[in-house]
Every structure is written in C-alpha cells, then in structure tokens.
Image (cartoon, coloured by chain):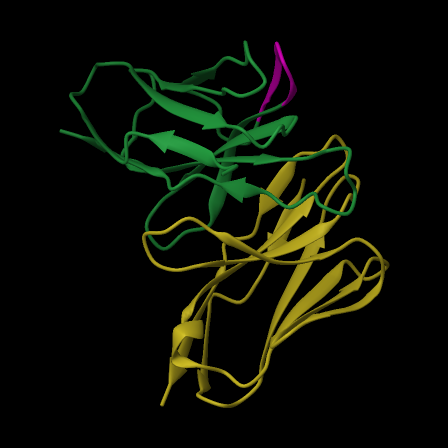
Chain colours: A green, B yellow
Amino acid sequence: DGGITQSPKYLFRKEGQNVTLSCEQNLNHDAMYWYRQDPGQGLRLIYYSQIVNDFQKGDIAEGYSVSREKKESFPLTVTSAQKNPTAFYLCASSSIWDRANTEAFFGQGTRLTVV
Amino acid sequence: GQNIDQPTEMTATEGAIVQINCTYQTSGFNGLFWYQQHAGEAPTFLSYNVLDGLEEKGRFSSFLSRSKGYSYLLLKELQMKDSASYLCAVTTGGFKTIFGAGTRLFVKA
C-alpha cells in the first residue's frame, strides 16, 4: 500500500540535544512538507521541498534543518537552537504535476516533548 | 504578507447544515483545499477547488471565488462524528502550501 510514514510517533528529548524526525513516502510524490502544530493551533510550515537536493524555508524555519537526498525521504532535524520545540510535527507529501490530484497526504505525526 | 482566515469555533446541531468560511490573501494561487482533523490525529483531505464554483462530494461541498479570495465548506446532515477541526489551505505560486488556523466544529445532539 502506498503511503507516508513518520517515525517515531512519540519522542522525548533533553534540552540542548538535536533530534531527527523521519519521514518516508512511497507515493512517488515530488513535493514534501514539514509542519508544526501547537495545541489548539493550525499548521505552520517549517520547510518544504519540490525536488531532490532542493528545499525552501517556510514561515518558522529557525532552529530546524532538513535534507532531501532521495525523493522518498525528507528528514527533519530539530536543533538545540529551537527554543520551544515541544509540539506535534506533521510531514506531508503531494504531487505537483498531476493537477487533478494535488492534495497533501499526511503522516501520522510525531509528538516531540522536551524534558 | 500571506494569510488565511477562518472562524475559530462553530457549534451546530446534529442533522443541520453548517457553513465554514475561509478568506485568503496569498502571492499566487494553485488551489484551495479543505482538510478535517480530529484531535491528536493527522489531517485528512476533504475537497479541492482550483476553479470558481461549487464542488460537491457527498455530504460535503466546497465553494471558491478566486476574485474575492473566498471559500466555504458546507457540511450537510451533520453527524456527531463531524465534530473536528476543519483546516483551509492554499497552495501558492511556487507550490508552497499554507494553512489557516482551523475552525473547531462542535456538533451537539
């Protein structure tokens, strides 16, 4: 079955540590996205990528980094520079070129807690 | 700047019809999406509009007016399970997809 997988579902991090969230998709989508969601809030865009080896900052990129070495994978690193990293992180992918099917498919999310 | 506005909360009665509005101002437009999100879960796709007009999908319909920067999601025959957040999202020029803050819908018996 095609889909998008995030891991882990729950993650605990000590202050000052970097942590990497995994996102893999087998939908052959070109575009991939990382969003952050805080309690009772909408989704805020961290980074997005349209093609391999290229990505752009979203609205809240500070303290985060990404890579897109393969079409299927878009890992997000939450660095120690991110001052308030506790949040629900959602990865999504979409087709750019199929205009009739451009909706985003989401992973199950990773809930990151800083302890 | 770019922004998407939706009401924060709405309450409706089981069996009724509810309309959730969304206004947007973005640089470029490549489509407007509505997603449903239950608490603690990932959003799921409901509808997509790229041309003006109404798109109908069972109990859900979505309308778009590009000249007004306006969309609405219409939910008919409300059920208790429709209690969720409804997110309006716009894909801008450059295929950057941004979301509104979401509208929390409470369906009461």
Name the foreground residue: B84 vs B1: B84
Q: Is residue A55 magenta?
A: yes
Q: Residue at x 78, y 33 (%)?
A: A97
Residue range of the region highlighted in magenta in the rendering: A50-57
Question: Residue A75 location in percent, x, y?
Answer: 43, 19
Q: Is residue A93 left or right of residue A88?
A: right
Count of numbered marks: 0
Residue extending furthest toward the front:
A1
Q: Residue at x 47, y 51 (%)?
A: B43
- Quadrant of the rendered structure where residue B17 is? bottom right
Question: Residue A88 location in percent, x, y?
Answer: 34, 40
Name the foreground residue: A39 vs A20: A20
Question: Residue A53 location in percent, x, y?
Answer: 61, 9
In this view, B85 is above or below B11? above
In this view, A111 is above or below A17? below
Question: Residue B91 location in percent, x, y?
Answer: 69, 42
- The quadrant of the image that shows the C terminus of chain A is top left
Q: Main secondary structure of the magenta part?
A: strand
Q: Is residue B65 left or right of residue B44?
A: right
Q: Is residue A65 left or right of residue B52?
A: left
- Quadrant of the rendered structure where residue A56 is? top right
Q: Is residue A9 magenta?
A: no
